Amino acid sequence: MAEAKAQSVAVIGAGIMGSAIATRLIETSQRVAVFDLDPGKVQALVDKGGFAAGSIAEATQQSDFVILSLNHASIVRAAVFGPNGVAEAAAADKILIDMSSIDPAETVQMAEKLRTETGMKWVDCPLSGGVPGALGGSLTVMAGGAEADFEQARAVMQHLCRNYTLMGPNGAGQTVKLINQLFCAVLFQATAEAVKIAEAGGVDAAVIPAALAGGRADSAILQEFMAKFSARDYTPTGRIDNMLKDLDSLQAFALKTKTPMPMTGQVVEIHRLLCAAGLGPRDSAEMMRLLDGSPV
């Protein structure tokens, strides 16, 4: 992507992903204003060179681009349209980049409301690649919005993404994110089961990714996670309950469109079982505990 001048960017939400996004933007010399309800998370980014904003509206006022990294559509709605939210400082020359993973229909409704009431543009930019991708500027982002808005957002997204693709109008990015999560959830479960089969057969599961590299069974998840699952390495790279949130949205969309999803339905229930067992806040590798019959 082409070089561009430093941009003024607000990052709303300094959780695991929001912090990584803000860190990358700071490291690429963007001017980053940060808002989060947790002062400690904000201070950690201030220490890296960001600026603390007293409210979402203040962060929006100071910035040309506003990135949201939040956990649920209701939180996005409150951040945009609630007291001291984005809409209070919105302007037609500003653009909202929603990197949250939320319901496509709610994205369409909120984007239209923001545009109609304030003139501010909205591009849904859910991501794949996690914290390593954000910190390395190698995220895959599936975007939804007007082509001109998508191109305007590129000035910021070029620092975060290796693959930045316009999928269609608002909501299309979120729909493709659901498809991404479908693949990830099914492959995580397949990886966990493959580890158990390897162990039952006396095979070192950690060497399987190299053995299958380039074959039809190869995938990024196989290469990144099979050895991790085999080692019972529970270092956080994502949360099971966040995956379940996306899978619930996927099921709701499938129900609305009468789309059969028998395999995905089984994987959704496995994630629901994991959350019921208290593993929701933990890494996907924790699904090995279920297959191992281990206590939580």
Image (tube, rainbow, N blue to C red):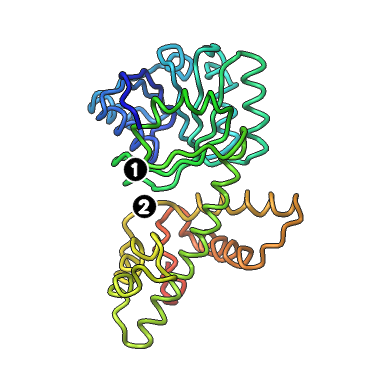
Q: Earlier in the sequence, mark 1 or mark 2?
A: 1
The amino acid type found where label 1 is placed reads: Ser
Residue highlighted by disc 2? 237
Residue 37, picture quadrant: top left
User: Which residue is at the far bottom?
Assistant: 201
The reply, left or right, for residue 230 in relation to residue 123 is left
Name which residue lies at 44% across and 21% down. 65
Residue 151, given in percent of the width and then of the height, sits at: 48, 26
Q: Nearer the viewer, residue 284 or 97?
A: 97
Q: Position of residue 144 (x, y in %)?
A: 57, 35
Q: Residue at x 29, y 33 (%)?
A: 23
Residue 138 - label: 1
Question: Dot 1, crowdedness within 10 Å: few (<14), some or many (≥20)?
Answer: many
In the rendered image, residue 15, in percent from the top left (x then y), is placed at: 39, 38
Badge 1 element: loop
Residue 87 picture location, percent across and down: 57, 16
Find residue 264 and report its image quarter: bottom right
Relative to residue 84, is residue 175 depicted above or below? below
